[in-house]
Amino acid sequence: MDILYLLIPLSALLVLALLGVFGWALNRGQFDDLDDEGRRILGPDDAALDQAQTRADRSPQESP
């Protein structure tokens, strides 16, 4: 029963901290444009890979 005197204030502080982090994320614009970010992830990459990256990505069976 005595542990509740410690756990209840700690859980209240944890909830306040989580609300603070969520509020900070809202103010920083983290949730402003969710649809475009989802499309950006699924779309093709704009940056071309250089030859060193393509050689590193090949499996050993594909290399000459």
Image (cartoon, rainbow, N blue to C red):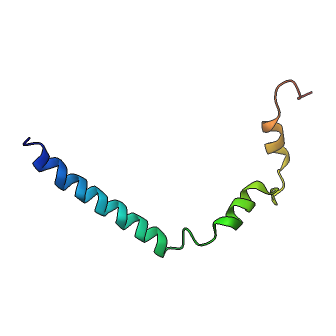
Q: Nearer the viewer, residue 50 or 6?
A: 6
Would you place residue 64 above or below residue 44 in this image? above
Task: Quadrant for the N terminus, please.
Answer: top left
Residue drawn where x is 28% and y is 56% of the image: 14
Q: Nearer the viewer, residue 24 or 64?
A: 24
Q: Residue furthest right?
A: 64
Residue furthest bottom in the image: 27
Q: Quadrant of the C terminus?
A: top right
Residue 27 in the figure: left or right of residue 36 = left
Asked whether, in this view, residue 29 is left or right of residue 44, the answer is: left
Work out whether 40 lies above or below 1.
Answer: below
Vertical side of 22 occupied by 7: above or below: above
User: Residue furthest toward the front?
Assistant: 1
Residue drawn at (35%, 67%) of the image: 20
Q: Report the label total.
A: 0
What is the quadrant of residue 55 in the picture?
Answer: top right
Residue displayed at 74% across by 61% down = 40
Q: Residue furthest top?
A: 61
- For residue 32, which quarter of the picture? bottom right
Q: Position of residue 9 (x, y in %)?
A: 17, 55
Q: Is residue 8 left or right of residue 62?
A: left
> Is 34 left, or right, of 61 in this rendering?
left
Q: Position of residue 36 (x, y in %)?
A: 71, 67
